[in-house]
Image (cartoon, grey):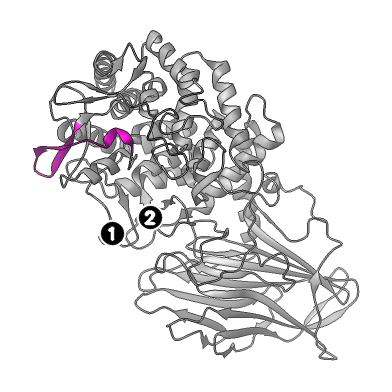
Amino acid sequence: MHAVADPADSGGFDLLDYHGAPASRGDHSFNIFFDSGAWHGYSLPPASEAATGFVGPFIHSLGKGQWEGSYFAHLALRDADSMREIVLAPDASDIAGSHAAPGYLRRVFAGNDLKVEQTLFFPDSWHAVVKVELNAASVHRLQFAATARAWPSGFSGPKAFGDGVEQRFSGTRSVLSTRLVAANGEAAKPAVVSGNEYSLALEPALTVGPGRPAVVFIEQRFVYDSTVEQPPAVDYAGAWQTNRARWAGYLAPLAAARLQGLSSDDAHRIAAKAVVTLIGNWRAARGDLHHGGVIPSYSDPNYNGFWAWDSWKHVAALASVAPDLAREQMLAMFDYQAANGMVPDCIFLDKSGNNARDSKPPLASWAALRVFQATDDRTFIAAIYDKLVRYHRWWAAERDHAHDGLAEYGATDGTRIAAAWESGMDNAARFDHIAMLRNGPNAWSADQQSVDLNAYLYEEKQALAELAGALGKDDDRQRWLHEAEELKAVLQARMYDAQAGYFFDRKLTDGSLVHIFGPEGWIPLWAGAASAEQAQHVAAVMLDPQKFATKLPFPSLAADDARFSPVEGYWRGSVWIDQAYFAIAGLRRYGFARDADVMALRLVTNADGLAAQTPFHEVYDPLTGKGLHAQNFSWSAAHFLMLLQD
């Protein structure tokens, strides 16, 4: 029995259901276990399947992510004296049994007086290791072999290289290699390959008995670019303990997870599932990604890269649980900062796919401040301060068409679609009638000043002031605070409609307000840019059941709008958890704590399966709470985590 004595197991077993078998090479339909920034992952076999081993690997850097193994680490044991096969079956006597926990997958089997445990974990971003522990009540001499099957495909198939096996992939420099390592020094035989199947075995026989366990490691290493990468050797003696210590560090801050009206157990489970989701979407520096970071979702083949807006939110959440990864994520985006200060929309393993047609809403300084508040790391802040300043100034230089202190979303290529992308709200109703205005070379603005953008910029000025103060840059600090006050005054005067009691975008052509009720109108509350009177009226709109106080609160378009589409609408009615988080934080900031508690509890309890095994989704139906679009979505995990920690 595995008691929950390991601090890293305190997040709970089976937070997500990792059972599944791919129906096709590109199957993304079920959960896959990744850790430590690895680009290859694995799953547990379907619960009905009794065979040993794991499903995989799934290699995320090939194509849009594809399975390159049907199964891995299937055990073939024989009695070395009689040569009889030892049949293993799931161990019904083990209460914990086969399960997933933060940082590993485990399978437990028994047969012929033997107990066998297989634990799959990642020592680093290159290696997956299955630790096989064999125990017996009486002495056994065992012939040990592990088998695997590569996914049939157009490449040449697995090849034996001495005592290991290699797989190479057409059109890439990637290599997947597999080998056995015995803790007691038994040697591996030459690998045997037959078609897509291969076997790795030890000799001489393993001896197992009372007080004499045997341990064998099955290692699978994936190298993205074999011409430049030099993976470190695995320290088998300490790798498992290092894994446990790392995960204990991730989970320790979750002890304080809480929400008024939510049980402590549910709060901790949701928070742990959020961390597992974020770490599962972590990808280490490879190819043209010079630092590691968190992708939006491995479940969606289109999300295999880093997006700026997503990245800032991931950084904000990771700051308290995985600060090193938070710093990496921020640096990854700034690696591609342009000479004029712009940070691109998204970046990929192959930089030819990077999108510099637009940026994303400015939350970088807010995220950096979260890192500083969690770590007091002035060295990191000193290294990125000038980058943050250049990015902030870029908005004024290239996205303020009227030069009046209010910015617009825009594009480098003058297209409406790129301007909508820059807002992060790709198909929001407020952009239905925008036109593009040229500001200069490779600089265009929509003819609409956006209230959320300017509220974000106000928050950025406040964050930059705090960061400047931490670095002893007092003149900078005073300048940022002065600019913030100026922007707040303009935003309050020009972007608020007293009759409607809400903030709106503003047309450049005639100064009229775009009277569409969306989440952009409550961002001034999150940023602290509204007056107390304005906030009171905005809060009333936010808490109106006909508009935003739906079963799952804070949809991306008011529920009484004729264009409201909760399921297919994307940014025209679905609930995005980042915007819901901003709404709740905004209510709290202006003293509406009880309302914030009610809405937060409604959000957590009505989102489908949040305290169960259901993955976090990209968006949710505000009328039913059903999760929609991509599963295992990082920024949903990030904002639920912050909701339980702030």
Q: Is residue 450 above or below residue 608?
A: above
Look at mark 1 in the image and give the residue it sits on.
353
Residue drawn 62% across and 66% down? 236
Residue 127 colored in magenta in the image:
no
Q: Mark 2 falls on what kind of element? A: loop
**In the drawing, does residue 437 fall left or right of residue 392?**
left
Q: Is residue 560 above or below residue 139?
A: above
Residue 436 colored in magenta in the image:
yes
Q: Mark 1 falls on what kind of element? A: helix
Among numbered discs 2 and 1, the one appearing first in the sequence: 2
Q: Is residue 376 visible?
A: no
Look at mark 2 in the image and give the residue it sits on.
305
Numbered range of the magenta stretch: 428-447
CB of mark 2 within 8 Å of CB of mark 1?
Answer: yes
Kindly identify the amino acid type of the residue bearing the numbered disc 2: Gly
Closer-to-camera residue (25/327) = 25
Pinpoint residue 600: horizontal percent, then vertical percent: 57, 27
